[in-house]
Amino acid sequence: MRVNTDVRGKRVLLLGACGVLGRAHARALVEHEAQLIVADRPGSTVLDDAKALGIPGIEVDIAQEFAIINGIARAAELFGGLDGAIFNAAVTSEGLVAGGGNAFPAFEDYPLALWQKAIDINLTGAFLFAREVGKVLKDAKRGSLINIASIYGVVGPDHSIYDGQLLRSFPAYSASKAGIIGLTRWLATWWAKDGIRVNCVSPGGVYNGHDERFTTAYGNRTPMGRMAKREEITGILIYLLSDSSSYCTGQNLIIDGGFTSW
Ligand SMILES: NC(=O)c1ccc[n+]([C@@H]2O[C@H](COP(=O)([O-])OP(=O)(O)OC[C@H]3O[C@@H](n4cnc5c(N)ncnc54)[C@H](O)[C@@H]3O)[C@@H](O)[C@H]2O)c1
């Protein structure tokens, strides 16, 4: 039997399509001829990015319940249903650095508002996304929901690799990513009999112009000795969207060059 990794014609919604990984995923899914719709927050580049790829794009703020309800209904209406959906949006360290200000206060002084914002987007957002996508997939009695977590939902950060960096890890990130892994397992068993598979992908650190001090410190902490390239995360999405993963549900697939194996 030939393994079917074909995603041609699969109707897929990618939320969080304009960041470091989202752009690479969108490009690859279009190249693999999935029927893709991209979504990202209002004010992002999502509409321009979609136009450049020749696919539909929508603005959705994952922190707003009504926006999620409307956005997913629009996506499903546009394609007459969905076969897969990827929750890739997040408040990330890189996003916080880009936003400026003191994004990484010491934990002892950590403001509730910063904690709450990341939990609202990263974890409550995943809940809302799953709830609305689930309605569409349940009607069709098939589909693949993919949540993007992180190695930091699995292991604690080695804070020393961030010494001297603008970029740091932050507590709500780890908590929300661990929460997404738990939510994924809960949903996988909830929907298993409805033909909906739910899995999580936990990438390790992806290279995005980090300085040499960081890449060396990160590499020394990683069995494969380096950060990931963006394209190295996309393959697992193709697998999870395709029929070759038909018996895979409730898993957290860790793509990290061995980071969590040490
Ligand atoms: N890049 C990495 O090294 C890495 C490592 C592990 C896990 N991840 C995870 O992979 C995913 C993608 O990461 P990335 O590096 O591309 O991050 P990124 O910060 O570059 O992109 C995040 C995306 O989420 C969107 N977003 C943020 N708030 C939103 C909101 N309220 N509504 C809708 N969209 C919103 C942003 O606009 C952006 O397009 C994230 O879940 C991240 O936690 C990334």
Image: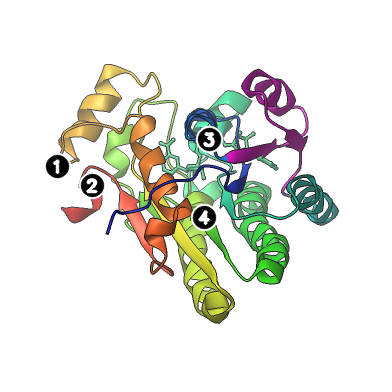
Judge whether 176 appears above or below 249 on screen: above
Residue 98: % across, % down? 58, 24
Helix or strand or loop: what does disc 1 sit on? loop
Q: Residue at x 37, y 42 (%)?
A: 235
Describe the element under mark 3 as helix, strand or loop: loop
Q: CA distance from mark 2 to mark 4?
A: 20 Å
N-terminal of the pair, mark 2 or mark 4, is 4
Q: CA distance from mark 1 to mark 2?
A: 6 Å
58 vs 154, nearest the viewer: 58
Instruction: Specify start and end residues of the magenta stretch as a single range.
Output: 35-62
Amino acid identity at mark 1 = Pro
- Determine crowd level at label 2: few under 14, some 14-19, many 20+ residues with C-alpha closer than 10 A: many
Identify the residue at horizontal 32%, vertical 18% (top origin).
Answer: 211
**Disc assigned to residue 223:** 1
Residue holding disc 2: 259
Q: Position of residue 151 (x, y in %)?
A: 35, 51
Residue 147 is labelled as: 4
Q: Are marks 3 and 4 in contact (CB under 8 Å)?
A: no
